[in-house]
Structures are given as structure tokens and as C-alpha cells.
Amino acid sequence: MDKMPKWADVVLIPLISLFLAAILSALVILGIGEDPVAAVKLMVDGALGSTYGWGYTLYYATNFMFTGLAVAIAAHAGLFNIGGEGQAMLGGLGVALVCLLIPWPHWTLALVFAALGAGLFGAAWAAIPAYLQAKRGSHIVITTIMFNFIAAAVLNYVLVNLLRPEGSMDPATARFPEAVHLPSLHELLAPIGIEFSKSAPANVSLLVAVGACLFVWLLIWRTPLGYEIRSLGKSEPGARYAGISSVRTIMIAMLISGALAGMMAVNNVMGEAERLVLNATEGAGFIGIAVALMGRNHPFGVFLAAILFGFLYQGGAELALWTSIPRELIVVIQALVILFTGALDNMVRMPLERIFLMMRKGQN
Amino acid sequence: MTLMKPLMGAAATLALTAGAALAEPALIFDLGGKFDKSFNEAAHGGAQRWTEETGGTYREIELQSEAQREQALRRFAEAGANPIVMVGFAFADALGQVAADYPDTKFTIIDMVVEGDNVRSVVFNEHEGSYLVGMMAAMASKSNTVGFIGGMDIPLIRKFACGYAEGVKAANPDATVIANMTGTTPAAWNDPVKGSELTKAQISQGADVVYAAAGGTGVGVLQTAADEGILSIGVDSNQNHLHPGKVLTSMTKKVGNAVFEAFSDGADMETGFSVMGLANGGVGYAMDEHNASLVSAEMQAAVDEAAAKIASGDIKVHDYMSDDSCPVLSF
């Protein structure tokens, strides 16, 4: 027996949370003497007002879709994967190795194998914490977050000592060959007569991300494995009683989760930078947690939340470019949204539940 | 339709304000942020000086992430900012991609050479300035041991270290130079705690003058040197005032001048390769009331003589980046 109708849970709560975050952000902007209305206009116009803005918003959103799905699938198994950041970094290494070591004839082939490489590296990075959780009971939150630091150190070592081209001062790999260039939305949409900004980084991996959303939905709700993952997440003793191996299910769920986080690198490393730089993930692994929370671990919710966070990222960049609002404050605004939609979820949920209960009593 | 109207209005207003911003110069700071007391702050100072002298306005952005490099360049170029100045070698790759797409916009990159018809590359002869402060360090040292603390271990910083070591050896052939780098990633530019630890380690090895060429990390080096009662040498900006009487001198690199010149030249800026060294005042050592008591007349005379000889070409200071090696210091 639900306390609230489903639409309130899925639509109303996130909207109210967003609204509260927006009000608080406006107060902060007022506090430093800037005009919040103009700031919002600038953000909306900069992120959604042109194909250029959309290109960046969708580029960021693509990253967040992958990491959001990674967190969501682990959450269905009752696991909290905070290691998306590290898994995505290692995924970047996989992409870089695939793109640099093999002379690809065409980008389609390269995309398939780069995605495989990214997924493999990401999954491998998730495998150790998963094994420790499944076999030894080491808490996955602790191990995955520690693996983020190890990943940063590994990437650091590899970039500085192994992959850096001779004489370069940047700790980054050489540029990938021209053949593995992924077509941007501009190049994809031009043949069908749609004019899309040339300089925006959104590329074909957006479609891969959408495909991944679909894949996760099918997996979770339409396959026996998804059923096992969900039962484990709801109750481990119950799942075991039903004959589901918790070790096997934890491992599989985390491997898929790690692979999804790693595949983010197809977008940011192969699609945008076309070389591997340090800190290429830029916190997308952590944003993925907020995206999954806000999207209620449902692929479609993740899709929408990813676009919202893409908007915040791109809008924030526009604010930094055209106003004197300092960059720290833009982080504050983004943090407020995460705080209200993620951490303070119950602050909105509980009063709302009470209101709905009262309304129901009134009807009876 | 009713909703479209105000939206269109907003877009039109924005387009208008963007139009009014035409031909403003723009400055892009690197990840260290504009108040790093060093490299970026020197650039900020140059831009501020330009504003005070000409009354002009300029656009600026402090980057938050690597992905924003290209984005910031393109956005400023598309909005008509001209010239666009960026501080730091890390922009080289992004600028190489972007410059050709905006042939009517002039770009200035500091500390790196980028080919392009509309790009001015400004590099400094840091080894020459470092040579001078190296001489001063050797003359001020009583233990015959001096230290060098670099930021990120890249050829550019080795160039500082090599010039410094040559200066030390020129003033006192028996002196020992200890050189350490803070790290191998850009985080090494902003790690004052590690800078402080390295300073303590060098003091325990006998160093009584340390030279920090490490951006924001240098703040920790100078602080620890002052706390422990030894002398330090600042870099890029004049940092003598940070600890009056404790900072021997600063190797000044006139990043601000490069920004100022680019802003003043405006859209008609000459492009190409520009070297700022001792001869044209691009680098030097800082003297002011904060370090007057530390530098003897004899010291200053020796350094000024060397400066004149370097400027005239009589003394050739080795440039690490010319052959990736240093005759007097091994890393």
C-alpha cells in the first residue's frame, strides 16, 4: 500500500527539491551582489538557447548517463558504487591504448573496440572491490572510494612515465590518429539538413549512452539476471533462500557497473579530447551518484537527470565566462542542487507523504 | 507563443550585450587560479595595470577543468574578444586546434610556442634571471649549500634549476646545489604543504638559501624558510614583501608585461615568436625596501655586472630546453 501516488514520487519530489535549491542559489547570488534573474537567463540561454549550448549540455549529459547508470545498476543490487570516478579513469586508459596501439581503418570499428576496451578496464577496476565485498565482506563504499585514489595514481604514473610523447610538458598521451575521430552531432546531423554547432563536443557516443539506458532497462526488468540483482538488493537472505548466489550476483552487478562507468571514456577521451589527459573524468563519477539518486535508479530517470546536470555544468561554465560570479560560487550552486535532490530527499518526501495521507483520510 | 515572446526578448538582449562586448581583450588563467601569488597573479597584475592606464575593460575566466580550455578559447573568440591571452604551456594543444578556426582573432600564449599566423608566442629566458639569483644565493649562503624547489617536473622548471645552479657555481665553485621537484602533475603547482616539507628536508641537508620556482607551492617554501630562519628566493612576481627581511630576492618574470603589451597592441598585435630576457627587461631580480638589508653593495655590483654581460652576450647561460641536459646539475 503506497503512501503516495507514483507520479508524486517520480515527478513532484524532484521538482520541489529543484525549486528549493534554485531559491537558495538565488539568495546566494543576491548575497554577493549579482542579479539572480539575469544569472538564470544566462544559464538557460547558454545551455539550451543554441545548438552550441545543447552540444555542450548533451556532451556533459552523455558522461553523466554512463556514470549514473553505473551507480543505478549497483544500487539495484544493494551496492553503493562510489568508484565510478576511478573506473572511468581506467576506462580512459583502455580507450587510449585501443586508439593508439592499433591502426584502425574506420571509426565505427574503433568505436566498438574502444567501448569494449573501456568497459573491460572499468570492469577490471570494479572487480577487486566486488570480490572483496562478495567474499570477504569488506564494505564496497570504502574499497571503491580507495580505488579512486589508486586509479588516479596509476593514471598519473602511466601518463607521466609511459604514454607521454617525447619532449612534451603536458602529462597527456599523443593525439589519437585522425581515423578514430568520432563524428560530432554536427557531422551526424548535417546530411539530414539539420544545422548543428560545429564547435560543440557532443558526438555519436550520445547514442551509445542512450543505448546503454535501454540495455539497463531491459536487463533490470526483463531478464532473469535482473530479477536476481533486484532480489539481492531487496533482501540478501531472501535471495539466498530463493537459490540466488550472492557472490555471483554481486560480482556480475559490479562488473556491469564498472564497465558502464568505464565506457564514459568513449565520450570524453575519444569523442572530445581525442587524447588522454590527467583528470579527464572531472568528477563525473561522483555526479553519477547524484544523477542516479535523482533518477530513482531508473534508466529513464537517469537520462533526464543527466540532462539536468549537463545543463548545470554548461550553464555554470557560461556564468563563469560572462559574469564576475567567481568559480567557487558556481560549484556552490551545483552542490545545492545535489544536496537537495540527493541528500535532503526526505526533507521534501516526509511532509509530502503526510499531506497525501491527510488528503486520503479526508476522502474516506 | 506567449511564452516565446519574453524568451526571444531575453535572447535579443543577450545578443545585444554580446555585441557591445566586441573587441575587448580577454585573459584566460590556468587552473592555479588568478590569486596564486605567482605566475597567474603576475598576469592578472598586468591586465589590471592596463585597465588603470587605459580605462578599458577586459574579459577573464579562471578555468575549472581541462575540458574548458578549448571551450573558453572558442567562446571568447566567437564573442569577438580580441586579442585573447592565455597564461601557461598547458594551453598549447587547445590553441593549436582552435587558432586556425578564427583567423581574425589574435591569440597570445605565454610560456609555450604555438605555430600559427594569428598567434604570438611569448617565452621568457628564465635561465638568465635564475642565474642572477643563483649568484646572490651563493654569496648569501654561509653553509655553501643552497636549495632549489621546483613545481611540476617539466623541462621548463629544469630550465630554472639549471640557470640557478650555473649562477651558484659562477659565484662559488665549491657550493652544493640540492634540487627537488614537488611532483609530476599540475597539482604540484598548488601544494604548499609539500613545498614546506621539501624545504625542511633541504634545511636538514644544510641548505640556508632556497629558491622556489613552483607557483602556489612556493608560498609554503617561503613560509617555512622564514619560520626556520633561513633565506628564500621568490619567483615570477616580486614576493619580497611576503616575509620582509627573510626573502633574499625574487626572480621576476614579467608575465604582466607580456599581458599588458598584448592588451595594448589590441587587434593589430604583431604575431610570431617573442623572447623576453635580461636584455629587454623580461626577467630580472627584485630589489625593494623589504630586502635592502639582505643584499650587500658588493653582491649587487657583482650581479649587475653579470646581468650586463648576459645582456651583451659575454656570458652564455645554458638553456636546459635547448638540449634537455644541464652541465652543472643532474636531475
Image (cartoon, coloured by chain):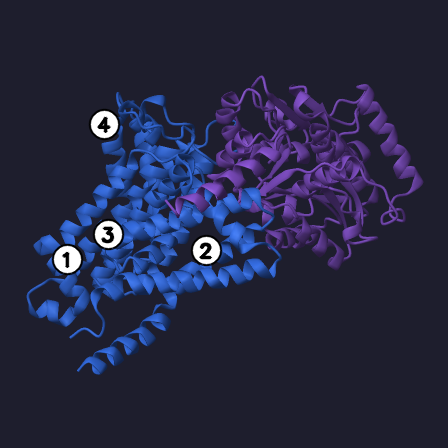
Q: Which of marks 3 and 4 is in front?
A: 3
Q: Which chain carries label 4?
A: A
Q: Which residue is drawn at 33% across and 50% down?
A: A306
A165 vs B226, left or right, is left
Q: Which of B28 and A99 is in front in this view?
A: B28
Mark 1 or mark 4, which is nearer the start of the sequence?
Answer: 4
State left or right for residue B17 relative to residue A56. right
Chain A: colour as depicted: blue
State the image coordinates of residue B89 (x, y, percent, origin top left): 58, 32
Residue at screen point 40% across, 47% down: A311
Frontmost residue, B318 versus A74: A74
Q: Name the residue under label 2.
A: A334
Chain drawn purple in the picture: B
- Using the numbered discs, state the Cα–Cα distance from disc 2 to disc 4 in whole angstroms: 37 Å
Marks 3/1: CA–CA distance: 27 Å
Residue, far top: B117
Q: Residue A300 carries which label?
A: 3
